[in-house]
Image: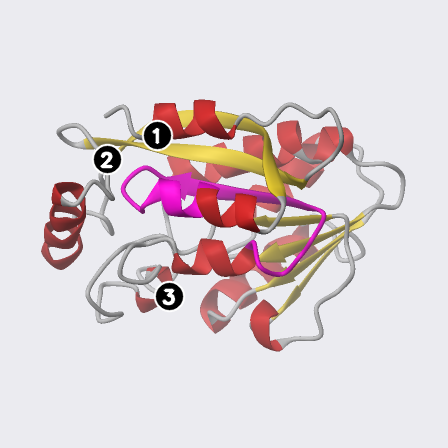
Amino acid sequence: MKDIFFCPEESNFYANCIENLVLRNCEQSESIVEFGSGDGSPVINSLLRNKFDGVVHGFELNTSAWKTANSTIDEYNLTTKYIINNSCLFQASQPKAKYLIANPPYLPAPDADIYMPLLFGGMDGATVTNDLLSLDYENVLVLISSFSHPQSTITHAKEHEYMVKNFVILPLKFGYYSSEPKVKNHIEKLRNHHMAFYSGEYYFLAGVLFQKNQENAVDLGRELTQVMTSL
């Protein structure tokens, strides 16, 4: 369905990041908030593969995706573990949680008139991601694209007292949404201003766990910046 985000490789990567960077560190009865749940498959797959006894509270604006997600949640009897609201996290009474997770909209473009408007991440692609880091959750897992001004996100995180706790990198080929001429041309302009980084048809997608600064903790922000700008 064209009105629901579909990229199996990216969704699988997001699921693996949730498992390795979040669920393995969760204590009993932990609460997780998710921005932009989509069809729910990354979290559903993660829950099916892990013994997590907490609750994931998702927020998804796309009604079609929300309905699809809830149908799958019912199918796998996960209704007590994964609850998705058909609303925007930024406009809701934000639930308390130890972790905020998201594969946020990161497509840069001059405006939101693109194949799927809900994937618009602002003119530099980093707007929504940076807004999520302003919500003040203790731990934030987000996917960051190398063509979406990654330095701005790392800098913004630091300004909000976050350090990079851990990260995983996936080389991805430009897909259906990022190859739209309007988007691709804008990304090329960002590259000319050293705000987007890619090589040929490939870019880096990073799963990054940000954590509120803790004493004696190692900040991997410099290493992440070096990797994301190396293309």
Q: Mark 2 is on which residue type? A: Phe
* Helix, strand or loop status at disc 3: helix
Q: Dot 3, crowdedness within 10 Å: few (<14), some or many (≥20)?
A: some
13 up-or-down from 227: above or below: below
Q: Which mark is residue 228?
A: 1
Residue pictured at 53% horizontal, 35% vertical: 208
Q: Residues within 10 Å of mark 1 (few under 14, many from 20)?
A: many
Q: Residue extending furthest right?
A: 28
Residue 153, how many percent across, how many down? 44, 46
Q: Is residue 178 visible?
A: yes
- The amino acid type found where label 1 is placed reads Met
Give above or below for 116 relative to 186.
below
In this orientation, which residue lies closer to the viewer: 197 or 177? 197
Is the Cβ of the residue at disc 2 closer than 8 Å to that at disc 1? yes
**Number of the label disc, if any, that sits on residue 197:** 2
Q: Position of residue 185 (x, y in %)?
A: 10, 52
Q: Residue 52, relative to residue 110: is it above or below?
A: above
On-image quarter of the C terminus = top left
Provide the secondary structure element on which disc 1 rests.
helix
Q: Is residue 176 left or right of residue 49?
A: left
Label 3: which residue?
Answer: 118
Magenta stretch, residue numbers: 133-154
